[in-house]
Image (cartoon, rainbow, N blue to C red):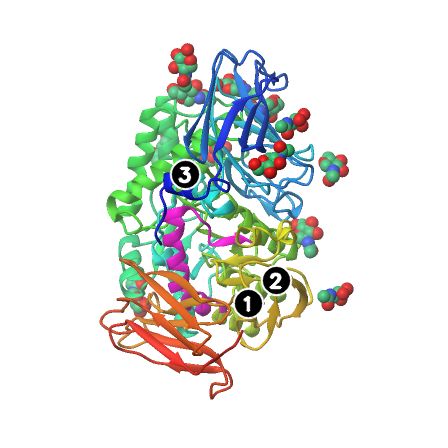
Amino acid sequence: MVRLSWLSLSALLPFVFCEYKIALTPSSGLLITEGNKTIVNNTAILAGAHNTTVSALRNTAQGLTYAFLTPTVAKITLNTSNVFHGARFSASETTRFYGVWEYPFNNRIDNANISFDLKGVGNNVGINWCNARAPFFLTSTGYGVYADTLKMGSYDFTHPGDAQFIFNSSSLVYYIILPKDEGGLKSIIEQYTELSARSEIPPTSGLGPTFWSDDFTMDFHGSVSNAQENIRDVVNHLYDNRIRATSIFADRPYGSGNRSWGNFDFDPIQYPDPVAFIQNLTDVSGIDFQVWIANRAQAGTKIYNASKTDNWLFPDDHPLGGLGEALNLSIPSAYNYFDESLKYFASVGVKGYKIDRGEEGEMPDYVQNEQMALFLDLAYDSMVGTWGKSLFYNFARSAVDRSRAKTHVWNGDSHANFTGLAYSVSSGIRSGLISFGIWGSDTGGYTREGVSTPSPEVWARWMWFSAFSPVYELMLGTNHTPWYPPYDNTSTLAVMKQTANLHADLLPYIRSYTNDVSKTGRPIIRALFLEAEKDEKTWDINDSYFFGSELLVAPVVSAGGSRSVYFPVGPSKSYLEYFNKRQIYPAGTTVNITSPLTSIPVFVKQGAIIPRGDIYQGNAKWIEGWTPDLRLELYPSFDVPESRFTYYGGGAENEIILRTNKADRSATVDTGSLELNGWGVKLIWYLKGAEDGKVMATKKRSQGGLVTVTNIETLF
Ligand SMILES: *[C@@H]1O[C@H](CO)[C@@H](O)[C@H](O)[C@H]1NC(C)=O
Ligand SMILES: *[C@@H]1O[C@H](CO)[C@@H](O)[C@H](O)[C@H]1NC(C)=O
Ligand SMILES: *[C@@H]1O[C@H](CO)[C@@H](O)[C@H](O)[C@H]1NC(C)=O
Ligand SMILES: *[C@@H]1O[C@H](CO)[C@@H](O)[C@H](O)[C@H]1NC(C)=O
Ligand SMILES: *[C@@H]1O[C@H](CO)[C@@H](O)[C@H](O)[C@H]1NC(C)=O
Ligand SMILES: *[C@@H]1O[C@H](CO)[C@@H](O)[C@H](O)[C@H]1NC(C)=O
Ligand SMILES: *[C@@H]1O[C@H](CO)[C@@H](O)[C@H](O)[C@H]1NC(C)=O
Ligand SMILES: *[C@@H]1O[C@H](CO)[C@@H](O)[C@H](O)[C@H]1NC(C)=O
Ligand SMILES: *[C@@H]1O[C@H](CO)[C@@H](O)[C@H](O)[C@H]1NC(C)=O
Ligand SMILES: *[C@@H]1O[C@H](CO)[C@@H](O)[C@H](O)[C@H]1NC(C)=O
Ligand SMILES: *[C@@H]1O[C@H](CO)[C@@H](O)[C@H](O)[C@H]1NC(C)=O
Ligand SMILES: *[C@@H]1O[C@H](CO)[C@@H](O)[C@H](O)[C@H]1NC(C)=O
């Protein structure tokens, strides 16, 4: 598209184009206006000696600067003699404020009535330790505010229409971010991500299917006598059942020493030959291997001894439980020791970490953000030297925004019931709103309060949700391995196979979006309102989302199997049921949908282009002479003259364009130079009246280019 320059645009459209202006108000707040319209009402700049006594800064001549950095980003700098600094914003009472925390307080996707610190959230309804966070909020009226700091902050959204933050910092920079071009709220997330940090593209193996156990050193079956053999037993069952897998990780315990952590090794009884074992797992079985780590030093271990000698541990007045103390990573020698010690794991073939804790009281709360960022930096550093960028998978429970450049996240210890599932879906939506785009949840739940295993119903529903999550990871092990008693459930095993294999087949689509995440910060799991901004009915929807921009996913998050689905106005005039390709739902309607345990309500947009196929072999060694296979599902509609999809296959991007022509009833796809190892891609057109019901497939093995179908009736 040809973009007009600012000058020619304003010359052509003098009445439409307006500039944002920022100015101090008589009461020492800041206003951003566009013409005579107030866009942002930053009612007060706050400062104080104690966080409970901050007040509006009156003498604003000193220590305050403000200016537009770009036409849509204003930078505000505060630097006074006060210890705490912050700001308050006012809008109409119906305004929604989104962001800040991944955890969905009250199972909401906005922050109505919440007042909490920018720190780990602890044990909570639905999920314990759901801790990704960012000093960034986004309003339904169309602006964002990003406080650029790792200091401790307190956010307050308890007064309807108001948002306030205060940071423990003698200086503070915050940005007010306005929408860019026609980009709307998504462009605010993009600009925020550009100012803070963007995610790396994860390796395809990190996206899963990933299987793990909370404790591979127990629950042995058959001839298994140690953890290493126990993992092989899982690998063999996945293979025998033809269930796709790309990674396995070992949670604690796996090492020697006190509570199995802190000596930077594998327990020789559980893992007699870690080097050969991991190499075999990766090279022969096609499965990458990750291990658990945390900033913890248990008495008697190597890291504890070194810390004691050099005084690296936080002073003892923190609740420790039996879980060990933490190192103050602001001390350079502590940081370097930890970093060097961790390099052992990469040296034996480990390709990433599950990074736990950092918010359990092992350090003063006010250093949580800074310390977690340091730990995620060193965890990244200890891997990247061996593997290189994007070739290992680190994922953390506790992460603050800038760390998204160093780690991906899982949503913490979800509860193994429908409450845990429902909260996990809304936390996935919230995670996207703070730009942690590469995300997964423990499929089936982790915390087993009152239940020893997820029920088959909960587990199946969750497996479907994970199939349509960026990352599919599933915990099996003691009492909940589908192929062993007491679980021993063939229907659960069947759904596990169905969903893991579907997730694997969606990797071309998901991987393309991980490229988008890394370039723009736009999430993969998208709140409905990110795609349907003008539809106020989407503002509070916490149980369905766009997966990328072409699929609307509505997981079943309660018992029974029915749920209501709202079809947003804006992205598509109607939506097609994705699996049976029969039902069509007009935008703006709400419909009750019933879904068996063997499916999930998913809908596709008019004009969608969905790449799918087998692009990563992983453990699928049962396929002899495996070669990659890519197919493009095409959903033309005469309501959509042109649609595009940017396919990313690991190297260059390919722009795929689908055009329709109502006058001559044709559709054309332009696959450009897209090819796959010298093979073409398969095209699958979804059209009305095709022979086998509704589908007509055109296979193509040439080098790409244009393919046209004529005389067609579109499905929707
Ligand atoms: C604001 O500006 C618009 C366009 O310039 C004008 O039509 C409108 O009357 C103004 N409103 C007020 C309250 O001044
Ligand atoms: C900004 O918000 C304050 C507090 O709610 C209000 O008194 C003031 O009128 C608002 N200013 C504008 C221009 O809307
Ligand atoms: C804040 O102001 C002080 C004194 O004017 C200056 O020394 C310091 O560098 C400033 N800090 C920042 C972060 O700008
Ligand atoms: C807000 O939270 C307070 C304290 O938790 C509660 O008493 C109040 O009812 C809540 N208000 C709304 C509107 O949810
Ligand atoms: C403000 O004080 C409370 C109570 O001590 C504390 O929990 C909170 O973390 C403090 N907030 C900041 C920004 O330091
Ligand atoms: C604010 O940070 C300082 C260190 O910079 C710390 O000593 C103090 O306890 C913190 N205040 C609160 C309320 O957490
Ligand atoms: C290595 O992997 C192969 C294929 O999965 C398996 O048969 C064999 O037992 C493995 N060897 C060891 C030592 O784990
Ligand atoms: C293991 O660590 C805990 C907590 O640090 C400590 O209380 C305990 O004494 C340690 N056990 C041994 C055997 O060192
Ligand atoms: C740490 O120090 C204790 C006490 O000196 C010792 O018993 C232990 O073996 C040391 N741990 C390691 C891993 O060297
Ligand atoms: C952590 O170490 C740094 C660097 O030595 C020090 O300034 C800071 O006070 C320490 N933090 C705590 C909470 O002990
Ligand atoms: C899920 O478990 C929690 C306790 O872990 C409980 O409070 C909640 O009511 C349970 N939810 C359902 C739907 O059973
Ligand atoms: C959906 O089902 C609920 C409960 O059975 C019912 O109250 C509601 O009217 C139904 N909604 C639609 C749109 O059919």
Task: Return the x and y of residue 59 as percentages of the image width and height.
Answer: 55, 11
- Picture coordinates of residue 567 (x, y %)? 61, 62
Of residues 474 and 305, the one nearer the viewer is 474
Q: Quadrant of residue 471?
A: bottom left
Image quadrant holding the C terminus, namely bottom right
Residue 27 position by quadrant:
top right
Query: Which of marks 1 and 3 precedes in the sequence?
Result: 3
Q: Are marks 1 and 2 in contact (CB under 8 Å)?
A: yes
Is 523 a magenta residue? Answer: yes
Q: Amino acid at mark 3?
A: Ser
Q: Nearer the viewer, residue 267 or 479?
A: 479
Residue drawn at x 40%, y 43% as measured from the top left = 9
Residue 455 horizontal/vertical position (percent):
63, 63
Q: Nearer the viewer, mark 3 or mark 1?
A: 1
- Report which residue position mark 1 lands on: 603
* Range covered by the magenta-colored residues: 499-527
> Which residue corresponds to the image point at 47% horizontal and 47% vertical from the top-left?
183
Residue under label 2: 567
The answer to whether the beta carbon of the residue marked 1 is less than 8 Å from any atom of ligand 12 is no
Residue labelled with disc 3: 403
Quadrant of ligand 3 in image: top left
Magenta part, dominant SS: helix
Q: Amino acid at mark 1?
A: Phe
